[in-house]
Amino acid sequence: MLRAYRSSEVREAEKPLLEQGVPLMERASFAVATAAVRELRSRGHLVTGSQVLVLAGGGNNGADALYAGAYLAARGASVEIVRASDSVHAEALATAKESGCALVDSGKDGILKAARRAGLWIDGLAGIGVRPPLTEPLSSLVTLLEEERIAAPDEPIVIAVDCPTGIGVDDGALVGPVLTATVTVTMGAPKPGLIAPPASRVCGRVEVADIGLWFTGEPAVATLSGSDVADLLRVPGPTDHKYTRGVVLLGTGSDSFPGAAVLTVGGALGAGPGMVRLDSPEVAGLVLRRYPEVVTGLGRAQAVVLGSGVPATETERLKAPLDRALEEKYPVVLDAGALELVKTEYTDLPSTVVLTPHAGELAELLSARGEGITRQDVEAAPIRAVRLAATITGATIVLKGASDVIAGPDGPVYSQPARSHWRAVAGAGDVYAGLLGALLASAGEDLARSGRGYGKPALIAAAASWIHAEAAHSDGPIRAMDIVDGIPAAIASALHD
Ligand SMILES: NC(=O)C1=CN([C@@H]2O[C@H](COP(=O)(O)OP(=O)(O)OC[C@H]3O[C@@H](n4cnc5c(N)ncnc54)[C@H](OP(=O)(O)O)[C@@H]3O)[C@@H](O)[C@H]2O)[C@@H](O)CC1
Ligand SMILES: [K+]
């Protein structure tokens, strides 16, 4: 599991070490210099003679970059420094100069010429001490450098110190200019913005430098790996039968969207529940032709999936199974049309109810509940939107996107990236809803016993996202049914991780 901690938690972790005189900055800058050497070498360059540009801001992030520059200059690199603030760390600057680094003319032309000369930039403009949007003069400098980076015939290697300058370190938001990194060398632990969208998209490869920080608390944001998923999966044993393994009931598909029933059933069956029931008479024939093992009609279940392929105007029929699930306290997935019910009627839900909107649906839901939030707002700061929706509704929220962002009213936020963007196709969300329903069904009795779930539904939803991403992993075009077909192998790969 990747565990990300906020700036304040990082500062707490560094405090006792700094009091003991542990040379954190030395370790941090050495990690940055080592990453720079490795990146140069991996592209066939020698360190000696390489042109390096150090971008030094006025805080300790700039100091890290300057000391890294000093190491590289001592190894024979030709290092130039852009001094982005009047208050650059004096000792670090003096060390860099003593090691042979040279200051560049801080005018626009001087900076651009130095940027063009250098094949590797070290971004120490701002780290965890900065909240976006960047203010002037840093804002214009970052805009200039990012434009130059994009336009350069040979794109420079950009090593971000701790985080790319300009990202929302604690919430993954992207507001205002940022300098995109090739590699981010982050100190002690990832920060939320390094693993959560949209900021995670500008971080390049994230490397965690072990500088001796120690974290014991719950992470702010986490990303599950295959072995975490394996820990959550309930593998059947010799005493299991179809009812102990979990029954999932689906109220999905309609005359308008019959395929959604096939896809949700396929997604659910792929996860290996004991039984799938379908309560959608108008599409039962179609589903049975493809999946004869499905049992039609209402009946006992440990989890329910409602709404995929059900138009918002036809949600009346979803109320009876929803009421029953709420009464008996077993988990529910509300997808697509069923989200309509949460706008007006079902306003206070337990966290065992999981809502699965995409960005537009989440914006609509939040707006209906009195928050003036647009789709763009959701996309610019998904963690904030998801947490807000969970707080307002009480439910667990899965915001579906290139990275799924998942949160309940408390506990960590999970960010689960796609393995391939080919999965952004019609029907992929229906497959997810069915898959999640089946996983919740296998955990259903436990979730019911623990009342509001204590974050567990979010964890199971994150596992469903991992499995879905793995099942959709592809080097070329795929259809939603390919994701269905990929689920059993994805689960097997988690179990063998
Ligand atoms: N934590 C650890 O364990 C360790 C941390 N270490 C390192 O320390 C870094 C944190 O350093 P930090 O606290 O000095 O802050 P930092 O990110 O350099 O930014 C300060 C500068 O930003 C500026 N500025 C502020 N807001 C702004 C805005 N909106 N827009 C524009 N500018 C803005 C502000 O300018 P001022 O307001 O002073 O003019 C000031 O100059 C951390 O990321 C890591 O690299 C390692 O060395 C050792 C272990
Ligand atoms: K930085």
Image (cartoon, rainbow, N blue to C red):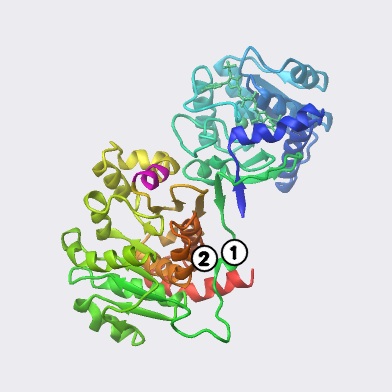
Quadrant housing residue 161: top right
Q: From what the image shows, is residue 167 above or below residue 136? A: below
Instruction: Give the amino acid type for the residue marked by disc 2 in the picture.
Output: Glu
The stretch in magenta equals 387-392
When the figure is inspected, residue 2 is found, relative to residue 54, above or below; the finding is below
Residue 434 located left or right of residue 1: left
Q: Is residue 327 left or right of residue 448?
A: left
Instruction: Return the residue at label 2.
Output: 470
- For mark 2, give the secondary structure: helix
Residue corresponding to mark 1: 226
x, y percent for residue 242: 45, 84
Q: Position of residue 38 (x, y in %)?
A: 74, 44
Residue pictured at 38% horizontal, 58% vertical: 354
Marks 1 and 2 close (CB-CB < 8 Å)? yes
The residue positioned 60% from the left and 72% from the top of the image is: 495
Q: Amino acid at mark 1?
A: Gly
Where residue 465 is drawn, which disc sits there?
none
